[in-house]
């Protein structure tokens, strides 16, 4: 465990390592990260502080092998406040830091020009002013000053990526994503367009994992990770929720929940999972716990650029879902009843089949099968072993190269013989 001591650097992190256990695989000893909050609820901050793969603490303490240490400046997590906290934002904007920095935006960018007269929608820090002593610096000004020199600019959460709830119809702020704000031609100092990690709130691990991979890239230790056409980490957002949903099997069999709390597919309650790109059901919300369908919630499309307007009204079935759910109901009923039949037989040992009895004291267990069920099982086994030897069948003697011969096994056992 590395020794830590209180920092002496104004605006610096809460702890500073005297020796870094992980550094050494590349040219960078540290990378600064400047967190800005636009039109935000701080939910992304909560998500990231709960991440585990890697954790925020591991990144800050330089405990991920091969990665530079991250020195984070965050308005919610910082111990310092006021000028002491803002000091290094200013140094970064002036290009006076001793290491590269990454810009992170949580919450929407906004259009300050919509305000009549002087003013701002979101601000951080202040500069001396002739009029009232201090003038708040808008977050948009910080983006303007920091984005060009950043090694990478990362938008976290749906507000920062696409605009999100602050950009819903009727909003007065002109809220938009960082990509909209910086424009199509924006490239970071390392040549990267804006990186987008959506979700409301996002999966914290999606963020820390992506940051770790970008740091590998900046360190020269790995390739640039794959991003899709909207700048999302492709491996995280390639699949739909439905592709990986724990309730997908119910959908396929045409069995749908009618009320919250039912365990089946939620599409008739308004789930948009079949068209939404999100990995929360496979990854969990925090350290593999939670996640919408895992906990009984429908997907309302919170990772998507069209959220929220294109997914409203929430809690009513999506217009197109009736086509697929009706189709699934039609063929699913047949498939499901055939599976129930097969499952019934697979829930018995061969010994119980021979005895025509199940030695279970549980009342729900039945003894012998119906004639129809046994006929179905007979046909099923015929098909199952049409091209293979059924376990327990007479098998020819096996002759090995050294002449050793294995006696063929005989079907049945002593107990079966006694029962005759
Ligand atoms: S709950 Fe939603 S995502 Fe899951 S199977 Fe049903 S429609 Fe698909
Ligand atoms: S499953 Fe849907 S509602 Fe849940 S986090 Fe993913 S996109 Fe958002």
Image (cartoon, rainbow, N blue to C red):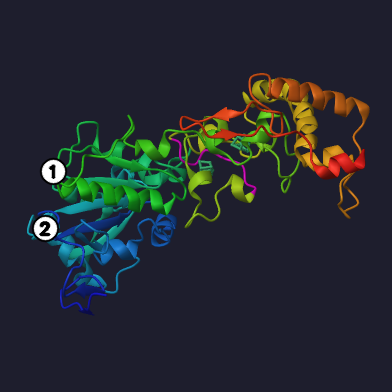
Question: Residue 38, image x and y in percent?
Answer: 34, 52
Q: Main secondary structure of the magenta part?
A: loop
Q: Which mark is residue 189?
A: 1
Screen quadrant of the C terminus:
top right
Question: Residue 96, image x and y in percent?
Answer: 7, 59
Residue at x 23% of width, y 70% of height: 13
Q: Is residue 257 above or below residue 288?
A: above
Q: Secondary structure at mark 2?
A: loop
Residue at x 86% of width, y 23% of height: 375
Query: Does residue 132 appear in this view?
Result: no
**Magenta-colored stretch includes residue 300:** yes
Q: Which mark is residue 99?
A: 2
Relative to residue 66, is residue 288 drawn left or right?
Answer: right
Asked whether 165 or 27 is in front, the reply is: 27
Count residues near mark 2 (Cα–Cα under 10 Å), then give few for <14, some for 14-19, many for 20+.
Answer: few
Q: Spatial distance from mark 1 to mark 2, Cα to Cα?
A: 13 Å
Query: Does residue 228 appear in this view?
Result: yes
Screen quadrant of the N terminus:
bottom left
Relative to residue 213, is residue 221 drawn left or right?
Answer: left
Q: Is residue 87 above or below residue 255?
A: below
Question: Residue 270, image x and y in percent?
Answer: 65, 36
Tell me: is circle 1 under 8 Å from ligand 2: no
Tell me: is circle 2 under 8 Å from ligand 2: no
Q: Is residue 60 above or below residue 27?
A: below
Q: Is residue 247 above or below residue 59?
A: above
**Magenta-colored stretch includes residue 356:** no
Q: Secondary structure at mark 1?
A: loop
Residue 158, quarter of picture:
top left
Residue pushed farthest bottom? Answer: 5
Q: Which mark is first along the chain, 2 or 1?
A: 2
- Give the extent of the magenta segment: 296-304
Asked whether 160 or 218 is in front, the reply is: 218
């Amino acid at each position: 465990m590395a020794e830590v001591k209180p920092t002496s650097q104004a605006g610096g992190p809460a702890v500073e390592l005297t020796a870094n256990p992980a550094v050494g695989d590349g040219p960078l000893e540290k990378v600064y990260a400047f967190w800005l909050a636009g039109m935000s609820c701080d939910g992304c901050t909560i998500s990231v502080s709960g991440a585990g793969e890697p954790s925020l603490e591991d990144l800050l303490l330089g405990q991920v092998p091969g990665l530079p240490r991250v020195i984070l400046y965050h308005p919610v997590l910082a111990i310092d406040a006021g000028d002491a906290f803002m000091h290094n934002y200013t140094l970064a904007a002036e290009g006076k830091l001793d290491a590269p920095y990454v810009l992170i935006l949580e919450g929407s960018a906004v259009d300050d020009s919509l305000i009549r007269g002087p003013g701002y929608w979101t601000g951080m820090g202040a500069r001396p002013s002739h009029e009232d002593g201090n003038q708040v610096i808008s977050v948009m000004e910080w983006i303007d000053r920091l984005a060009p020199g950043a090694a990478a600019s990362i938008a976290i959460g749906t507000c920062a990526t696409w605009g999100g709830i602050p950009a819903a119809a009727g909003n007065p702020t002109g809220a938009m994503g960082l990509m909209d704000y910086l424009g199509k031609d924006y490239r970071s100092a390392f040549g990267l367009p804006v990186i987008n990690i959506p979700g409301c709130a996002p999966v914290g691990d999606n963020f820390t994992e992506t940051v770790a991979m970008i740091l590998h890239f900046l360190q020269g230790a790995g390739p640039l990770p794959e991003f899709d056409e909207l700048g999302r980490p492709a491996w995280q957002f390639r699949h739909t929720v439905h592709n990986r949903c724990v309730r997908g099997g119910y959908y396929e069999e045409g069995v749908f929940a009618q009320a919250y709390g039912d365990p089946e597919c939620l599409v008739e309650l308004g789930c948009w999972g079949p068209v939404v790109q999100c990995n929360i059901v496979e990854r969990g919300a925090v350290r593999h716990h939670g996640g919408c369908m895992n906990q009984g919630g429908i997907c309302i499309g919170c990772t998507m650029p069209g959220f929220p307007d294109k997914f409203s009204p929430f809690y009513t079935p999506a217009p197109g879902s009736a086509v697929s759910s009706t189709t699934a109901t039609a063929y699913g009923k047949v498939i499901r009843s055939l599976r129930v039949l097969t499952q019934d037989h697979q829930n018995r040992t061969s010994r119980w089949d021979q005895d025509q009895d199940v030695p279970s004291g549980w009342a729900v267990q039945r003894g012998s099968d119906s004639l129809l069920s046994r006929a179905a099982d007979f046909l099923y086994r015929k098909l199952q072993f049409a091209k293979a030897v059924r376990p327990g069948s007479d098998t020819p003697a096996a002759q090995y190269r050294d002449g050793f011969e294995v006696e063929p096994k005989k079907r049945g056992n002593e107990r079966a013989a006694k029962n005759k």
